[in-house]
Image: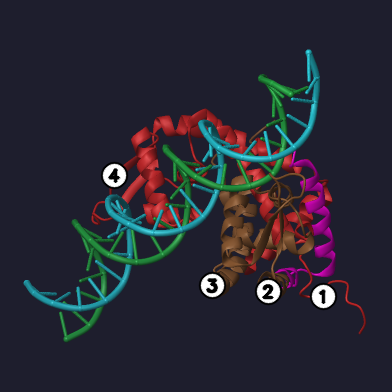
Chain colours: A brown, B red, C cyan, D green
Amino acid sequence: MSAERHPDHAPLELEHFLPYRLSILSNAVSQAIADDYQRRFDLSMTEWRVMAVLARFDGLSAREVAERTLMDKVAVSRALAKLVEAGWVTRATHDGDKRRSVLGLSEAGWAIHEVVAPMARAHERNLLEKLDEEERTWLLRILDKLQAIEPK
Amino acid sequence: MSAERHPDHAPLELEHFLPYRLSILSNAVSQAIADDYQRRFDLSMTEWRVMAVLARFDGLSAREVAERTLMDKVAVSRALAKLVEAGWVTRATHDGDKRRSVLGLSEAGWAIHEVVAPMARAHERNLLEKLDEEERTWLLRILDKLQAIEPK
DNA sequence: GCGTTATAGTTACATATGAAACCAATTGCA
DNA sequence: TGCAATTGGTTTCATATGTAACTATAACGC
């Protein structure tokens, strides 16, 4: 075998390195969305994610929120402190297990959600519009495959 | 038009929301790689990225490193402080412009690079192996398209 | 030449994040 | 029962990161 184009130890070309590209793209996308609701509601990405899962699953405990968002429990605890303080999330104690909290969106929380969810969807749509139908299909399929493995 | 499947204001399903999926995947991938070299060399992701571009482009200034890595100059400054201190990067002053630094990998830096670059490539290969040839082609094409836009 | 403006890089401060220690309530089981 | 181990959640501390202010040098306009 002769001259390899990319000997294993040769300098990485970051701009062609898949993990780097994913990271750049992902940050650009998430940041663009977060900028929006951050400015309008002083809502961080982690806080928004908590609200999003509570919108779907009312009555979760903090641990369950952490599972659903893949955030760690400290991050969830902090997000909840702020959200409850802001009056966007309600917190009660579980009957029969006083450790657990029972969480949900308040009226005000739902109002925020009604604004932010469409904003988030619009950003996603905007992104997907850069692709044609075939590409979109492949992208979803590829993501499924890659994600099926990673979260070992 | 009747019952929309996803009214714009309905709760987001995070696990199907593209920006969220990208974020999860990207973090999992980058973190898996970083864990490796972090433990072995006490090297952060930002520091490794700086080393990677210096391996390819010897003699860059800090600002140029920032451009190539898409990091901001403060992050680069901090990474360089650590890398120079560790003896992995050399820093001189540019002739004719005393503001500029002239950066490069030291012998020790190259030695690290010889270990880390193959590690990084192995992770990437491992990831791409989850896909078949057709999927890989589409993935690159899709990334090109999505990235062509974002960095507005 | 000389004051203004711009640029390279660092420092300082404020905020975010993660790991470990911690408290309280619950469960398991001898 | 009663005590050891587990679990839900918060607090603490150490580190990371971003923004703005700052220092030093260089470039520009006149």
Asked whether the beta carbons under mark 2 and mark 4 sit within 8 Å of each other, the answer is: no
At a point 57% along the width and 72% down the height, the residue shown is A41
Residue B85 visible to the viewer = yes
Distance from Cα at disc 1 to Cα at disc 2: 12 Å
From the viewer's perspective, is the residue at label 3 or at label 4 nearer?
3
Residue B92 got which mark?
Answer: 4
Q: Are marks 2 and 4 on the same chain?
A: no
Q: Secondary structure at mark 2?
A: helix
Q: Which residues are magenta?
A: A123-152
- Sort mark 3 into few (<14), some (14-19) or many (20+) by Cα contacts within 10 Å: few
Q: Are marks 1 and 2 on the same chain?
A: no
Instruction: Name which of mark 4 and mark 1 comes first in the sequence.
Output: 1
Q: Nearer the viewer, residue D7 or B130?
A: D7
- Tell which subunit mark 4 falls on: B
Q: Residue at label 1?
A: B7
Q: Residue at label 2?
A: A119
Quick one: quadrant of the C terminus of chain A? Answer: top right
- Sort mark 2 into few (<14), some (14-19) or many (20+) by Cα contacts within 10 Å: some
Q: Secondary structure at mark 1?
A: loop
From the viewer's perspective, is the residue at label 2 or at label 4 nearer?
2
Q: Nearer the viewer, residue A114 or B137?
A: A114
- Sort mark 1 into few (<14), some (14-19) or many (20+) by Cα contacts within 10 Å: few
Residue B14: say if magenta: no
- Tell which subunit mark 2 falls on: A
Q: Residue at label 3?
A: A39
